[in-house]
Image (spheres, rainbow, N blue to C red):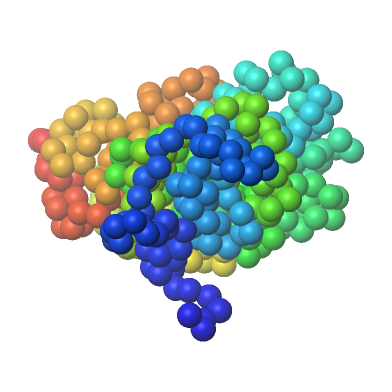
Amino acid sequence: MNKKSLGINTICTHVGGIDDTQFKGAISPIYMSTSYAFDDVAIKRYPRYLNTPNQEALCKKIAALEKTESALIFGSGMAAISTTILSFLKQGDHIVLQQTLYGGTYNFVLEEFKKFGIEYSFTKDLDIISFKECIQPNTKVIYVETPSNPLLTITDLQAVSDLAKSKDIVTIIDNTFASPINQTPIDFRIDIMIHSATKYMGGHSDILAGAVATTNEFIEKIWNTAINLGGSLSDFTVWMLERSLKTMNLRVKCQSENALKMANYLESNPNIAKVYYPGLESHLNHELAKKQMKGFGGMLSFELNEGIDAVEFQRKLQLIKPSMSLAGVESTMLNPAVASHALLSPEERANQGITDGLIRFSVGIEETEDLIADIEQSLEQILK
Ligand SMILES: *Cc1c(COP(=O)(O)O)cnc(C)c1O
């Protein structure tokens, strides 16, 4: 085709598939082999080497979505995160991490880094000055996550990459919450994009996977560490993920539209004390979100009025399920204080603004009228 750049739905459906030359089937065949004959000594295909036919094909789709040269896929988001971070740091190196991070990443830093002698600093807030203050002569990486979990705060990607580039520091973003549909950080010269593909890329709450997208040069560096750490995934999962990605734009667009409607509804509900959603004008970072995001995503959080028990409120919901994970086509809610952030101390939670009454809401593709009716009936039962 004589066209420079393909549309997003075309990339989702067509890029990185495998042609079924044998039967001309409509979808990619799945190759489950762990053993491939050598017809050329240079090609050693093996699932842990992340180079099976299905793995290589899917990486092309993910690279196209993040507008990078190359990508790698892993058995989980944490495998992608730990492998990428460890491939850029050695004993005595330093990394700057933003204050509000996914709980698993936070624990990885706290529990594993001391074993490797890697130094780290957490920024005291998301202002670029806090990032500057953390930088040391041995800083090799700046790691950000925006929008963040669970308060949907926004980090200024252009400011972070300008700061890093001026000091030869590599920038890594966990782009899970936005997905490549709502945010392509390479537009702001961020170097490496990571995803928990368990979330919006998978989108149906049935796949555990991770992805990294960046330059050929960095992918080679990450690959060298990846084959030693062994966080690869099954080709069946790869194949499922390829299928899921075909509808990612449709799903995420619908989820983002629904989340904006739900945020507006919740903000107007007198039983809700506060709503956090980057698409709301009341959100602290709304202007910045408008600048660097194409849509505001399907995640929001809110605080019930004091005196309304968050756990009781969720128990009385009929349609919206309480769930640890997020980003599925079905709406789910979670109470960070007792679930995703339960491992943090009460002081650490308070530091990050996570109160006991806070509820994180992963908005699905249902009609918002039905979601609103569910919330109304739960509140009615509690308040009567
Ligand atoms: C879920 C999640 C992860 C970890 O991904 P897994 O697939 O569970 O290993 C990392 N970052 C964010 C923002 C997440 O939501």
Place of residue 272 in the rendered image (x, y in percent of width and height, measured from the top left): 30, 45
Place of residue 170 in the rendered image (x, y in percent of width and height, measured from the top left): 75, 47
Say which of 25 and 310 sits in front.
Answer: 25
Q: Residue at x 82, y 31 (%)?
A: 93
From the viewer's perspective, tell me whether residue 189 is left or right of residue 193.
Answer: right
Place of residue 380 in the rendered image (x, y in percent of width and height, measured from the top left): 12, 40
Say which of 260 and 68 sits in front.
Answer: 68
Place of residue 221 in the rendered image (x, y in percent of width and height, measured from the top left): 72, 41
Q: Residue furthest top?
A: 115
Q: Quadrant of residue 18?
A: bottom left
384 lies above or below 243: above
From the viewer's perspective, tell me whether residue 254 is left or right of residue 375.
Answer: right
Q: Residue at x 78, y 51 (%)?
A: 164
198 lies above or below 309: below
Say which of 322 and 232 sits in front.
Answer: 232
* Quarter the C terminus occupies: top left
Q: Residue at x 44, y 73 (%)?
A: 7
Q: Residue furthest bottom?
A: 2
